[in-house]
Amino acid sequence: MRQRQVLFLDIDGVLHRGNSYIAGNRIVSSAPARIQLFEYLPVLCDLLDLYPQVEVVLSSDWAYRFGIEPTRNMLPESLLRNRVTEATYQGCEFDEMLWPTVTRGAQVLDYVRRHSLDQWLAVDDRRDGFDACRDRLVHCQTDVGLGDAAVVALFQSRLHERFGKPTT
């Protein structure tokens, strides 16, 4: 049986700059210039194209707030939508209402433990709770996300370290 390879994906501060909020019936960016949501999705898709076996588990507040299916359906890139399998809060062993109060690293590590994962990586603008596994975190600056070339280079390196040689 093949070992699962999982990327834990945050949305705000990773796929676009800044956070987001609900305005009427829309979700908009909090970035000063009202940046387009998912502006760095092509960067992520290009990176993951080389690793077709990697599945995506949402570690974003979006999945908790809106649900996994609505969040998946909001992603404009169908190839990424097809990779999204779950969210970290699903099946947690404590009250889901407490989920937002748990550090991001603890959320991810809880999922890792429950699913006995060995091959995993997280990309997030939060570092809280990742102290014991910083080498599995690609940390983005909230105001830059995957628009930072140094972060993208680190991401490429960590993908190779965790998931092996990319397919070409």
Image (tube, grey):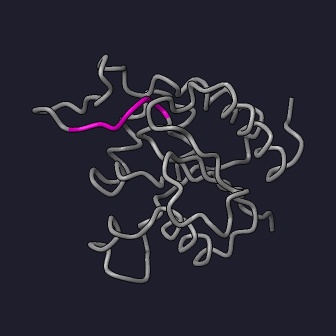
From the image, which quarter does the N terminus lie in? bottom right
Residue 119 figure quarter: bottom right
From the image, which quarter does the C terminus lie in? top right
Q: Determine whether 164 is above or below 118 in the image.
A: above
Residue 102 figure quarter: bottom left
Q: Position of residue 143 (x, y in %)?
A: 44, 31
- 46, 137: nearer the viewer: 137
Q: Position of residue 75 (x, y in %)?
A: 42, 33
Residue closest to the far bottom: 93
Left or right: 120 as drawn, with respect to 99: right
Is residue 23 part of the magenta span, yes or no? no
Q: Position of residue 113 (x, y in %)?
A: 61, 77
- 128, 156: nearer the viewer: 128
Over which residues does the magenta segment extend? 15-21
Is residue 17 part of the magenta span, yes or no? yes
Residue closest to the far right: 165
Q: Main secondary structure of the magenta part?
A: loop
Residue that appears at 57% across and 30% down: 146
Residue that appears at 77% across and 46% down: 158
Residue that appears at 56% across and 24% down: 147
Q: How many marks?
A: 0
Left or right: 27 as drawn, with respect to 93: left
Residue closest to the far left: 24
Q: Position of residue 137 (x, y in %)?
A: 65, 53
Residue that appears at 75% across and 68% down: 118
Left or right: 143 as drawn, with respect to 161: left
Residue 47 figure quarter: top right
Q: Determine whether 32 is above or below 119 in the image.
A: above
- 67, 146: nearer the viewer: 146
